[in-house]
Image (tube, rainbow, N blue to C red):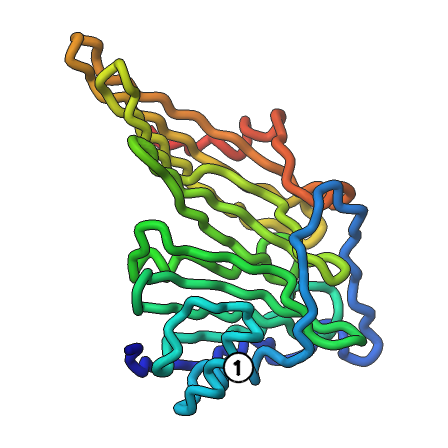
Amino acid sequence: MLFLRSWTIILLVGCFAYGQIPGIQARREPTGHPISKPLPRRFIGVDPVTIYRGLLSAAQNDRAEAYRYLDDKVSDMSGPGDARIYAVNLDSDADLEYVLLVSDYAGISRTNAFVFDRDARGWWVVGEFRYSWHWDTNEAERFVGLREIIWPGRKEIIVRDYGGGTGVAETGLSIYRMHDGYLYRVFHMTEDAFYFIIGAGRAKYEHRTIEYPEHYENDPVFLTVHYEKRLEADPRGRPAGEVRSCSVFRWDATRFLFGEDKLAPAKLCVNQRR
């Protein structure tokens, strides 16, 4: 049975609407045509706050209906669970979008995330993300994040995905951005990785740290990625090894993604870690 956990609706709304001061015209963000495919979306026709309230309801019928809207047939519905909802601006229109996080601790522990957007027809789920592999309560706090990276007043969604198998474990990091009612992945990297090299008798570790350099509104937007690789010494006597490097990615509004900028590292990777 799930235990009732504390919950909070977090409304991330600014103190004033950007560009609505009389006489001041808000500058519109230049956008092109995404070259990647968006995430699939599905119509649900009910607002996410209603679903959120249903998940926390004391009535099992309300909880079952909320899970049905989320197309979830396996979560335990015997009691209210852990749910959080964020109201944020993810795109260029005035309406807020919603991000809902739902954790289930019965059976296979997991956390699911849902991104909602509304058009003239009603509410859609435009993104779904799931975390269950070697689930950990503290790692679940890092599963989905929100950050203003590219344009003032708009947030991007940062999602980590976890997976692995025999001798392999990886954590990926992706950045998603809204455009015209759809959610696109605009950046991806492997954040952490462990590989046991079969036959060599040693392991390889990789880690990438992403940084978000500050920029002014008219400046280009960059991501800086610091890379570290370590090889353990093996029984045959080969020594341990270590490699470090730095890469820079620049926001390309025309293609709607971050692409590697080979000319930028000289100025943005000066403080490469030793």
Report which quarter residue 108 is drawn in.
bottom left
On the image, the x and y values in percent for residue 260 come to 61, 31
Q: In this view, does 151 lie to the left or right of 7?
A: right
In the displayed structure, would residue 223 be above or below residue 264? below
On the image, the x and y values in percent for residue 239 come to 21, 12
In the displayed structure, would residue 114 be above or below residue 192? below
Q: Nearer the viewer, residue 234 or 210?
A: 234
Residue appearing at x 79%, y 62% in the figure = 27
**SS class of the residue under badge 1?**
helix
Q: In which quarter of the image is the C terminus?
A: top left
What kind of residue is marked 1? Glu
Residue appearing at x 30%, y 69% in the figure = 106
On the image, the x and y values in percent for residue 189 come to 50, 38
**Crowding at label 1, few (<14), some or many (≥20) Cα neighbours within 10 Å?**
some
Residue appearing at x 73%, y 77% in the figure = 122
On the image, the x and y values in percent for residue 234 come to 19, 15
Report which quarter residue 199 is drawn in.
top left
Residue under circle 1?
65
In the displayed structure, would residue 257 be above or below residue 55? above
Q: In this view, does 119 lie to the left or right of 264?
A: right
Residue at the limit of the structure toward the bottom, as seen here: 59
Residue appearing at x 33%, y 56% in the figure = 139
Q: Which of 113 and 68 is in front in this view?
A: 68
